Image (cartoon, coloured by chain):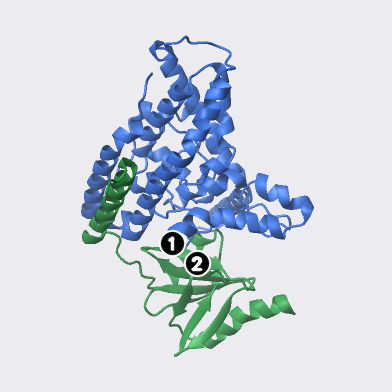
Chain colours: A blue, B green
Amino acid sequence: MLDFSPTEYAVPGFVLLILIEMIWAWRNRPDAYEPRDTLTSLAFGLGSTVSGLLFGGFFFLLFLGVWEYRLIDFGPEWWAVWWAWPLCFVLDDLKYYWVHRAGHRIRWMWAAHVNHHSSQHYNLSTALRQTWTGPFTFGFLFALPLVLLGFHPLMIAICGGFNLIYQFWIHTEAIDRMPRWFEGVMNTPSHHRVHHATNPRYLDRNYAGVFIIWDKMFGTFEPESDDEKIRYGIIKQLGSFNLLWAVFHEWIGMLSDMWRSPWEHKLSYLLREPGWSHDGSRDTSDAIRARWQERQIVKTSVASENAIAGEQEPA
Amino acid sequence: MKVSPELMQFLGSLVAILAVAGLAWWLKLGGTPQLSSDREAQAAAIEAIDGFESVETAVDANGNGAILRDRSGCLLLLKRHGNKLAGRLLTHSATGRIDKGQLVVDSGERRFGLVILTIDHAQSWADRINGVRSERDA
């Protein structure tokens, strides 16, 4: 049977592209990299491969068990059904959109995904800042419809691998915009910079993996504005390069909130959006965006009032 | 001694990531951001806490951080983190003290670390920080 892991073959390419981007940074944008941040990002990448080795097998076996109940049978040589591959890739990308969206909107999922956003930098090494704790969430459930539909778990894993490889190159500031047609359909550095931004207007936007069309379809698309400098990272920047703290800080925060909160709110700290609190003492991304929008309205009305007042001044 | 291929791969990857991070250091990537004015600190404060409008700002003489107060009395601490800045709104867990004329701020978050600021009127800032705690305790 087919045995192929695309990400393993891609690693030398990842390293080469990081080196090329570093030379670009050295010549043009030395602030785009920070050695300790880079080390933390790369250590995240290494740790996530160990986590994948430890837990990946379990989920693969689980999916194989579920696959026995598939609706469509692609036959014993499922890998030879050529059209199943692009179909699986597109559906897997749709799955990625939703699991990623859940990763930002449900604190339990965010506890694992926050790792990827914890750098204040945005470069190719940031792409390798992958989670160690994903297996402790319910993210795997999002793949079950594909398995039940009949796609072999290995086919899904290979498509997921190519999806991850695609997402590597978009973690850069070295590329401004791709051709218009490409920006219209595909996820690009510009679209993904928005996703990593903490500017209020950009919060919880552009969840796409490969095809940006999902964000446009489901109302979460936001284009990058040339008028506003992007700030990367998370709302409450870590302020520490400690690797273990970076890996586990949100888990610790979430569990501690659950421990200390009244019984009726414990589940909310697990399942509601990051930043939610039962006493309203913290901000969710929706609250931050709403406040920002309110300020923009005030600014606009003040500016227009001033303009009218200016017009009324005697010559 | 026989070493498993997985362990070899892990060790090889570890050496590779140290080499890449070493290269970033050797190329002197990063640099050091320094806050040199109240205006810069205020801009950084807005980036740290959206909408934070400072009415009083004290910037560290070495540009390593700043402390700011808004109209409602909230205090925001900025510190250098690599070549970026990170901020915290100070809560009742924060403490401020004076050591050798400098303001030493503990945000109450162990991982955020102590922030040492060389600023004017350090004692009054320390009093304000400790005031947040006493307001809660009152």
Label 1 sits on a secondary structure element that is loop
Q: Amino acid at mark 1?
A: Asn
The one nearer the camera, A138 or B93, is A138
2 and 1 marks in contact (CB < 8 Å): yes
Q: Nearer the viewer, residue A67 or B130?
A: A67
> Residue A278's image quarter?
bottom right
Horizontally, is A141 left or right of A89 in the view? right
Q: Is residue A110 above or below residue B82?
A: above
Q: Which mark is residue B111?
A: 2
Tell me where residue A225 appears, x and y as whole percent.
43, 43
Q: How far across and how far down the image is residue B72, in percent?
A: 64, 71
Q: Chain of mark 2?
A: B
A35 to the left or right of A294: left
Tell me if A109 is positioned left or right of A74 in this view: right
Label 1: how many Cα within 10 Å (few below 14, some 14–19, many 20+): few
Task: Give whichever of A113, B53 is nearer the camera.
Answer: A113
Circle 2 Cα neighbour tier, 10 Å, few/some/many (<14 / 14–19 / ≥20): some
In the rendered image, the quadrant that contains the N terminus of chain A is: top left
Q: Which residue is mark 1?
A: A242
Question: Label 2 is placed on what type of residue?
Answer: Arg
Q: Percent x, y for residue B37?
A: 40, 73
Q: Is residue B96 visible?
A: yes
Dot 2 falls on a residue whose secondary structure is helix
Q: What is the chain identity of the residue bearing mark 1?
A: A
Q: Residue at x 53, y 41 (%)?
A: A135
Q: Nearer the viewer, residue B4 or A239?
A: B4
Q: Position of residue B102 (x, y in %)?
A: 45, 85
Q: How many marks?
A: 2
Q: Which mark is residue B95?
A: none
Distance in Å between CA atoms under marks 2 and 1:
8 Å
Q: At 50% across and 65% down in the image, what residue appears?
A: B87
B11 vs B81, left or right, is left
